[in-house]
Amino acid sequence: MRKPIIAGNWKMNKTPAEARALAQALVPLLKNAQADVVLCVPAVDMAAVREALRGTGIALGAQNMHWQASGAYTGELSAAMLLDAGCAYVILGHSERRQYFGETDEFVNRKVRAAVAAGLIPIICVGETRVQREEGYTDTLVAYQTLTALTGLSAVQVAGVVVAYEPVWAIGTGLVATDEQANETIGVIRQAVRGKYGDAAADALRIQYGGSMNPANAHGLMQQPEIDGGLIGGASLKAEDFAKVVNF
Ligand code: PGA
């Protein structure tokens, strides 16, 4: 059985003071969580959130990183920096990074390999646009994005990463994939991984759904056999809402 994993993606929200308050509000609400819980916060918030989460089982995560260990990459962060700041996870290849910052599948793969080599757990985002779904490319696309992102990892390493299936048309729009759509596409991703890395990796790999997941729809999504958790944007910014999703 795969343990569910629920991650909050705060995106570009919360000053350090606001971040501390949100993390402190979450701690008591999540003390009986049955799922692994991760807060992926802006880099400037990490110190405050790390402090607030100390002694809890809640993990800290980042939203992006560079694949190089160090160097002249103005504005970027390395895996070693994230680890030293207390991160255990890093979101890679989020559709907003692909769409607004030109991240390609090849960039995402370099980042995934650097994260895994450093001991960070990547949360690798894949997903189709509305047009791609309407034109029937969803399955091919998500399989390609996933296998490209994982290239160069061993089956054992693949078993330890997290994939987030986030249909682009469902992110921040209030449109949510139906439970069956999400389950089916996540099944496609798992089959692709099974074909290349074998049963053990495919059965261990945790695959989240993301895209307008909230307290009202979390239970239904989490009942689906292929769905192992959620990557939560908007609903992770309010303590009560995020706690309801975690405690689905
Ligand atoms: P949303 O964002 O929950 O606000 O749709 C999810 C995500 O982009 O990770």
Image (cartoon, rainbow, N blue to C red):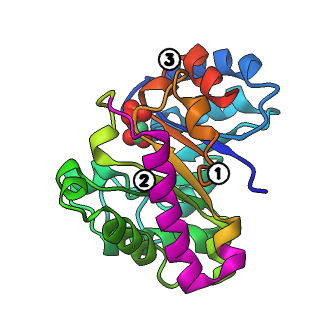
Q: Distance between the residues labelled 3 and 1?
A: 36 Å
Q: Which amino acid does label 3 sit on?
A: Glu
Q: What number is the disc on residue 16?
A: none
Considering the image in quadrants, where does the N terminus appear? bottom right
Q: In the image, residue 143 lies at what x, y percent?
A: 40, 71
Front one among 93 and 178: 178
Q: What number is the disc on residue 18?
A: 3
Q: Which of marks 2 and 1 is nearer the N terminus?
A: 2
Depth check, mark 2 against mark 1: the one in front is 1
Q: Which amino acid does label 2 sit on?
A: Asn
Q: Earlier in the sequence, mark 3 or mark 1?
A: 3
Residue interval drawn in magenta: 175-201
The answer to whether 64 is drawn above or below residue 46 in the figure is: below
Secondary structure, magenta segment, majority class: helix
Check whether the beta carbons of the residues at disc 3 and disc 1 lie within 8 A of each other: no
Q: What element carries label 1?
A: loop
* Residue at 36% across, 74% down: 144
* Residue at 48% across, 22% down: 237
Q: Is mark 3 within 8 Å of ligand 1?
A: no
Residue corresponding to mark 2: 64
Q: In which quarter of the image is ligand 1?
A: top left
Residue corresponding to mark 1: 225
Check whether the beta carbons of the residues at disc 2 and disc 1 lie within 8 A of each other: no
Circle 2 residues within 10 Å: few <14, some 14–19, many ≥20: many
* Residue at 24% across, 62% down: 136
Q: Is mark 1 within 8 Å of ligand 1?
A: no
Depth check, mark 3 against mark 1: the one in front is 1
- Residue 63 makes an appearance in the image: no
* Residue at 79% across, 32% down: 56
The quadrant where residue 81 appears: bottom right
Q: Distance between the residues labelled 2 and 1?
A: 29 Å
